[in-house]
Image (cartoon, rainbow, N blue to C red):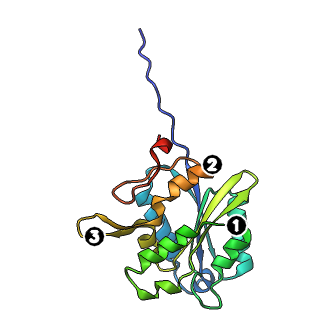
Amino acid sequence: MTQMTLELPTPEAIKIGLVSISDRASAGTYEDKGIPALRDWLNKALATPWQEEARLIPDDRATIERTLIDLCDNAGCQLVLTTGGTGPAPRDVTPEATLAVAPKLMPGFGEQMRQVSLHFVPTAILSRQIAAIRETPSGSTLIINLPGQPKAVAETLEGVKDADGRQVVHGIFAAVPYCIDLIGGPYIETVETVIKAFRPKSAKR
């Protein structure tokens, strides 16, 4: 008698857009560190398979808007992470571009990013990071504007831990998987030693 084995379904991969916004890096006069920082952190933190769509672009509002629309509507990204262009300088227009294409603001993400960063630098109050949702023909996409510094990218995603590894301030990525659930995206699981995703018991698989 042949013994049958039950194959577990392969988790659906999430497609994530990585956008580094920098005049100098996009012109080739400065090495881009934004996309590598995002990629390294996601490789460390995600237990679910993921696919990358990366873009390196200048601090130009029209270009940022076109890039976000392309990643959401054409590339099919369910999550887009941007880095750079969120300060008060005249060329910092990432939040404005994001809201122009994704008007459903998620203010808690920006509030929490500033809470994390204030543990490290008082100038965190100058940051204008936001998150918003874009409705697309095939679903919805969560867009999150992260800081420009690679170290700050990891800090805001992961949060603040004490010397014993206990969470002092939650990183924003703890809420991302459940948000993706709620907007109809794939089920994301994380490496809990890096960042523990929070879901209500009724939403856990």
Q: Amino acid at mark 2?
A: Gly
Q: Is residue 202 above or below residue 116?
A: above
The picture quadrant where one finds residue 57 is: bottom right
Q: In 3D space, how far apart are the residues under numbered discs 1 and 3 (Cα atoms)?
A: 35 Å
Pick the residue in front: 26 or 121. Answer: 121
Q: Amino acid at mark 1?
A: Ala
Q: Which mark is residue 184?
A: 2
Left or right: 175 in relation to 70: left
Please report whichever mark, 2 or 3, sits nearer to the chain's N-terminal start: 3
Q: Secondary structure at mark 2?
A: loop
Q: In 3D space, how far apart are the residues under numbered discs 2 and 3 (Cα atoms)?
A: 34 Å
Q: Is residue 96 above or below residue 11?
A: below
Question: Which residue bears the numbered disc 1?
Answer: 102
Question: Which residue bears the numbered disc 3?
Answer: 162
Query: Can residue 144 be seen in this snapshot?
Result: yes
Query: Can residue 151 be seen in this snapshot?
Result: no
Q: Secondary structure at mark 3?
A: loop
Residue at far top of view: 1
Please report whichever mark, 1 or 3, sits nearer to the chain's N-terminal start: 1
Neighbour tally class for label 3: few under 14, some 14-19, many 20 plus, Cα within 10 Å: few
Neighbour tally class for label 1: few under 14, some 14-19, many 20 plus, Cα within 10 Å: many
Left or right: 77 in relation to 35: right
